Amino acid sequence: MRIDAARTEAWPLLSYGFRPFFFGGAIWAVAAMVLWIGMITGNLDLAPGLPLVSWHVHEFLFGYVGAIVAGFLLTAVPNWTGRPPLRGVPLLALLALWIAGRCAFLLSGWTGYAAAAFIDALFLPALALLILREVRAAENKGNVRIGILVFVLALANILFHTEMIVYGQAAFATRGSISLIILLIMLIGGRIVPNFTRNWLAGKGSHRLPAQMDRFDYAALATGAVALALWTFLPAAPLTCLFLLAAGALHTVRLGRWSGWLTMREPLVFILHAGYAFIPLGFALVGLSLIWPDVLSPSVALHAWTTGAMGVMTLAIMTRATRGHSGRPLTAPPSTQLIYLCVVAAVTFRLTELVFPDAALTLYALSAIAWIAAFAGFLIIYSPMLLFSRS
């Protein structure tokens, strides 16, 4: 069956990168959590071909986050380069690679891990090559580093599979992948959060605008990058803890320089600051958990980055980009504010376990319910904007 390229380009879902990947990513955010709960409670036996915790980690880092990174970059890169967006059959092919990776692991218990790993490993290199092709064609050298980071993330995915096959676990690749995604948020967040804040504050006539990118930002980014590298390669070294805590302090100041408290009247902007706030919180909690692992669980502390920075920031970007590119007002109605509260509740419940470890099961369940509610809510509210053109 031959696909009509001209017809596919006319489909709203395939007209821009954010549409299929935000839609698919939100579906997977809900489905993967439901599947995870079913498997760990013994009510669902899918035999994914790797330890359940490893499946959970992989499918949220490379499955969900991978989709949202793709949707954001395939939408942002055309704006950065002035080139036309990927659409139609090429976009459909990239989406098919992402879907194939998700299906491969659900079937890997029957097909074998190596086959599933090979299929899953195709998506991120394809995305990285597309981004690098676009920035190179536009001679947009400033954004080459974004494409390189995605390519390194693709290598981290391959390393994850290699570690799983050789050692039966992927501790190093997991730390490395989390570090790369946090670094992406630090870089991209440092561009969009102050810019969107500046635009909103200027529109309100405020004279207290976010600080421009300067040497302090570069110092904060460099310290954060070193801290993440040390945590990836030398998690037990005393120097690692020092850099993590220093990065947490610097990124707290960096966030404060963006005047986020002045945007509380517009949740569509304020949620970006809330999402970024989990970056320094993650640095602090992960660093402290290295000093007092018996007091602060390292695995729970890590959720400041995974559920917090990744979950809140991606939902913030998904809602803003969808509203902006579908011609809706750049404001968060009550329904959108509700899903923001749900995703913040998800990370709050998860981190509260650090204080009340005896209530871990209850807090874990509440966190999962809040996460599902946030992304199911996104699908209910935003699917019509993603699937159909505004008439």
Image: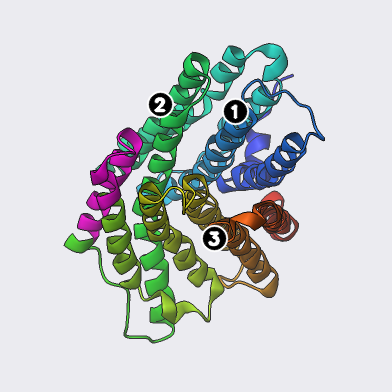
Quadrant of the image occupied by residue 341: bottom right
User: What secondary structure is the magenta-colored segment mainly?
Assistant: helix
Quadrant of the image occupied by residue 254: bottom left
Q: Quadrant of the N terminus?
A: top right
Badge 3 amino acid = Ala
Q: Which residue is mark 1?
A: 93
The percent position of residue 247, horizontal first and vertical second, equals: 29, 56
The crowd level at tag 3 (other Cα within 10 Å; few <14, some 14-19, many 20+) is many
Badge 1 amino acid = Ala
Numbered disc in front, either 1 or 3? 3
Of 5 and 136, the residue lying toward us: 136
Helix, strand or loop under label 1: helix
The answer to whether residue 311 is above or below residue 130 is: below
Residue range in magenta is 217-242
- Give yes or no for contact between labels 1 and 3 (Cβ–Cβ under 8 Å): no
CA separation, marks 2 and 3? Answer: 27 Å
The percent position of residue 264, horizontal first and vertical second, equals: 50, 79
Of 148 and 294, the residue lying toward us: 294
Give the residue displayed 31% in from the left and 33% down from the top: 233
Q: Which residue is mark 2?
A: 155
CA separation, marks 2 and 1? Answer: 21 Å
Query: Within the magenta stretch, is there residue 225?
Result: yes
Badge 2 amino acid = Leu
- Coloring basis for residues: rainbow
Give the residue displayed 57% in from the left and 13% down from the top: 114
Q: Which residue is mark 3?
A: 316
Of marks 2 and 1, which one's residue comes earlier in the chain? Answer: 1
Q: Quadrant of the C terminus?
A: bottom right
